[in-house]
Amino acid sequence: MSLQPDRSHRFPAAPGVLEAVRSEGGRRRRTRLAIGGSAISVAAVVLAVSLLLPSSTDGTAPLPVATAPTSCPAELPTDVPEGPVGYDDGGERLVPDATPQTMTLCRYRTDEDAPVEGPRQVGSGLDRIAADLALPQELEGSQRICPAVLEIPSFSYLVRLTYADGKAVWVQSETGGCATTRNGDFTSSVGIGGDLNLTWSAESWSRQPQPRTSDERNCYAYDSGRAGQERQLLPEGYVDVGACVDNAFRALSAEETRRLVDALDLLGRDPYTNGCSDPPPSDEFTPVTFVARYPEGRDVHLELAPFCDNQLANGSLEAHPHGDVLQELLDIAEGTT
């Protein structure tokens, strides 16, 4: 079957979902720190990480480097200690598209009363930060259903990144199923607490291990989510695309990938609502997931849930294929024409 896309899309407001956590949108308003009796200590922390902004104007003099923090806030703040500094794209990207010179972690255990740990310096792997933290922006109107069980142990992290050109950014994230990642101006619904757990132990930037299929490809959206998926179901720039049917991976041919892109272009797209919280028994449907791999950074997973009005979602956007488009997607996944 060959479908011709009209490449037109709609973005209506998403419906409400019981027990959903409503997003404040990609640009979350920073709240002021309000830790009783600690105004002076907070000011000291901000001063310790303040920047020496470049003073040369001819572009030839070496630029001062932002300083790494020498201490951590004694209590977990409600938001990052300060917004991005010298970073005009802080509301569009979580971190600059550059390699940081320093990465510093502060860790807070949130399931019990424990003192802050840190600061801890991360000594390697910083060249992967820009790609790995190119996360999708949380869309206004998106909703998530959060698991009721608290992850134990549960941690929240403050991360300070500094750059040679004077830029600096605080990033905050946590472990758990409802984690977000934010810099004070930008919020992503992709949490990186698991990555930061590994990074804390290794003192090197590390990504979560992913459960793999026998052919070393991932059929689970365990570590997926990249910038661009809040605008396209399948962002451009992928190296290859595969299909997982019943958690068995199969690489798509170039022709099958073209058919997939054409079918997706026929679909309207809405902010992701995770509208089905109770899937039926697994023997009542066959799980179908399309997996796109990129030269660097995270994968994109498109999961089709037939029990949920044929919801096709990448974690930021969702669509609901029916009729010929749905059949085309199933044919592509199963390798039939």
Image (cartoon, rainbow, N blue to C red):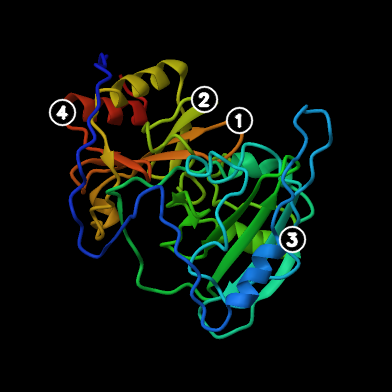
Give the CA distance from mark 3 to mark 2: 31 Å
Q: Which mark is residue 318?
A: none
Label 1: how many residues lie within 10 Å, few (<14), some (14-19) or many (20+)? few
Asked if residue 29 is positioned above or below residue 111 in the image, the reply reads above
Image quadrant of residue 9? top left
Reply above or below: 301 against 8: below
Q: Secondary structure at mark 4?
A: helix
Residue located beneath label 4 in the image: 323
Question: Gap between marks 4 and 3, in whole Å?
Answer: 50 Å
Tell me where residue 329 appears, x and y as whole percent: 29, 29
Nearer the observer: mark 4 or 2; the answer is 2
Q: Earlier in the sequence, mark 3 or mark 2?
A: 3
The amino acid pointed to by label 2 is Gly
Instruction: Tell me what residue is drawn at x 82 percent, y 28 percent.
Output: 60
Q: Amino acid at mark 3?
A: Ala
* First in residue order: circle 4 vs circle 2: 2
Q: Which residue is mark 2?
A: 237
Which residue is the site of mark 3? 202
Q: Do the residues bearing badges 2 and 1 touch, measured as CB atoms within 8 Å?
A: yes
**293 relative position to 286: left or right:** right
Q: Rounded to the nearest whole Å, what is the CA distance between mark 1 and mark 3? A: 24 Å
User: Would you say 103 lies left or right of 328 here?
Assistant: right
| Earlier-in-chain disc, 1 versus 4 | 1
